[in-house]
Image: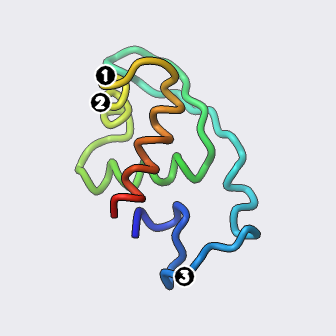
Amino acid sequence: MGPQGLGSSPAGGEVSTASIQGETNIRKRSVLIAGHATSVSLEEAFWRGLKKIAEARGKSVNGLITEIDSETQGNLSSAIRVFVLNNVVRD
């Protein structure tokens, strides 16, 4: 299943709704996209998933966000969420 900690349980079973407490809190973080500082707001679960994907690919989170940004138009936070979700569903 996808990156550990993003909608997956250690035993591979279903995730209870109680386990999402705190995961839906929005966290705003400063990032560099192609050398330009900006901020991105995502739920903690998506930040964690993005970090795990970046690590698995041998990239920095900023580098991965730059790639996502270069391939999308519109809302970057939404694009990141879809990217992380697609990586989890694909696995």
For the residue labelled by badge 2, is the local secondary structure a helix, a strand or a loop? helix
Q: Position of residue 13 (x, y in %)?
A: 54, 82
Quadrant location of the N terminus? bottom left
Which residue sits at x=58%, y=53%?
45
Name the colour scheme.
Answer: rainbow
Task: Confirm or deny contact between disc 3 and disc 2 (CB under 8 A).
Answer: no
For the residue labelled by badge 3, is the local secondary structure a helix, a strand or a loop? loop
Residue matched to label 1:
70
Q: Position of residue 8 (x, y in %)?
A: 52, 70
Name, please, the residue furthest toward the bottom: 11
Task: Confirm or deny contact between disc 1 and disc 3 (CB under 8 A).
Answer: no
In this rendering, is residue 3 above or below 10? above
Please state which of residues 33 and 21 is positioned toward the viewer in this rendering: 21
**What's the residue type where badge 1 is placed?**
Ser
Task: Confirm or deny contact between disc 2 and disc 1 (CB under 8 A).
Answer: yes
Question: Can you tell which quarter of the image residue 22 is in?
Answer: bottom right
Residue matched to label 3:
13
